[in-house]
Image (spheres, helix red, strand yellow):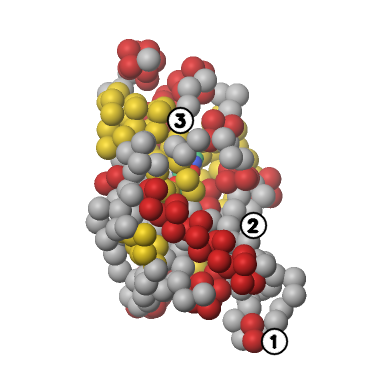
């Protein structure tokens, strides 16, 4: 396999590469095969190869929404480092591997705004599309025109926003559990606004100030999605927004803050953040998450669903 991957991609292929430091929670075993795509042409070459060979793979962006198993991933991990962009009027075509803070800064330098609400999120544009990343009442789907993907049949296609089935922290990509059937996002066409640089900088600073209050430490940010509820209890009226109750609120009611399993614990500051003290294991995170889910279900009859994705647990 190693030689085939090398030959077909023309790129460096490494074996048994530790993944934990490539995730924000610093947890996870090794990738059996690891290939870094430094631009969109390399990403396409690797993507075509893995699709053609029919091997197990996943794209690793910023690793900020992933819990990778302690035994690692028995397939090809494609680390997406692509990051070029081109501007056509108020539309920008951006490679999927660009880090969100870098993208927002580069756009600001060009007097283009609209994505400031995403600053402070340590992921890539591709990961943000998959998760329909959002904050402060806005989400990336509101700014997307289309994405260019390599589909699971090996064809490059442009998919318009309306066909991407965006929802709360969800997209067509996330709804398909097998990574091999999802398609690989190569580029994203964003619709942005021309704006005054000072005004954009002011917004960025504002959002960063609001984020400064978030828990510190190794994490994936919010662990569970805010569940949709049909029946709103009287005492929930103040916290329910758009038919969703904050997972953090429910977890607080079961006194989850500070709960621990081995070297991972629930942030004492925010009940929906699971933090790794440093030597945490995926097994501990998963067990802690399962116990929190079970308790919320017992107490409220509400099933929490992970916002993070599990990799390599099958
Ligand atoms: C401190 C902190 C704060 C956060 N705040 C927020 C927040 O406010 N709002 C929010 O929505 N999220 C937040 N997150 C979660 C996370 O950062 C986002 O979901 C982010 O968009 C994930 O991007 P990523 O590149 O890290 O994806 P990864 O974690 O690397 O991957 C996530 C999924 O996307 C897939 N993927 C990535 N790139 C591609 C591609 N090019 N093609 C196909 N599939 C791809 C991966 O295979 C995987 O399935 C936060 C996380 C942290 C650690």
Q: Quadrant of residue 18?
A: top left
Compared with 80, 6 (above or below) is above
The residue depicted at 62 percent of the width and 45 percent of the height is 175
Question: 145 or 221: which is nearer to us?
Answer: 221
Q: Using a 10 Å C-alpha cutoff, classify the residue at mark 3 as few (fewer than 14 neighbours), some (14 to 19) or many (20 or more).
A: many
Dot placed on the residue nearer the N-terminal end, 1 or 2: 2
Measured as percent of width and height from the top left, residue 311 is found at 45, 41
Residues at marks 1 and 2 touching, judged by CB atoms closer than 8 Å: no
Residue designated by label 2: 167
CA distance for labels 1 and 3: 47 Å
Q: Position of residue 114 (x, y in %)?
A: 49, 65
Relative to residue 184, is residue 215 depicted above or below? below
Foreground of the two, 142 or 52: 52
Dot 2 or dot 3: first in sequence order is: 3
Between 50 and 141, the one lying in front of the other is 50
Badge 1 local density, few (<14 within 10 Å), some, or many (20+)? few
The percent position of residue 129, horizontal first and vertical second, equals 52, 50
């Amino acid at each position: 396999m190693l030689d085939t991957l090398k030959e077909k991609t023309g790129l460096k292929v490494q074996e048994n590469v530790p993944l934990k430091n490539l995730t924000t929670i610093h947890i996870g075993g090794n990738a059996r095969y690891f290939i870094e795509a430094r631009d969109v042409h390399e990403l396409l070459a690797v993507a075509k190869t893995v699709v053609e060979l029919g091997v197990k793979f996943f794209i690793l962006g910023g690793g900020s929404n992933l819990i990778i198993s302690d035994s690692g991933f028995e397939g090809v991990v494609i680390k997406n480092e692509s990051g070029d962009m081109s501007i056509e009027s108020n539309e920008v075509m951006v490679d999927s591997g660009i880090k969100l803070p870098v993208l927002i800064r580069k756009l600001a330098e060009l007097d283009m705004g609209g994505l400031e609400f995403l600053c402070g999120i340590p992921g890539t544009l591709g990961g943000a599309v998959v998760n329909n990343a959002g904050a402060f009442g806005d989400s990336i789907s509101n700014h997307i025109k289309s994405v260019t993907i390599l589909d699971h049949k090996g064809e490059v296609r442009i998919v318009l926003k309306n066909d991407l089935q965006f929802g709360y922290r969800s997209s067509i990509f996330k709804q398909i559990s097998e990574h091999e059937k999802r398609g690989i996002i190569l580029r994203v066409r964003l619709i942005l606004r021309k704006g005054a640089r000072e005004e954009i900088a002011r917004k960025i600073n504002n959002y960063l100030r609001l984020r400064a209050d978030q828990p510190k430490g190794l994490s994936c940010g919010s662990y569970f999605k805010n569940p949709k509820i049909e029946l709103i209890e009287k005492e929930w009226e103040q916290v329910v927004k758009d038919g969703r109750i904050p997972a953090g609120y429910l977890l607080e009611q079961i006194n989850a803050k500070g709960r621990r399993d081995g070297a991972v614990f629930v942030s004492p500051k925010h009940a929906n953040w699971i933090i790794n003290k440093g030597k945490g294991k995926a097994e501990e995170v998963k067990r802690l998450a399962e116990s929190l889910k079970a308790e919320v279900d017992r107490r409220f009859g509400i099933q929490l669903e992970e916002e993070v994705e599990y990799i390599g647990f099958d």
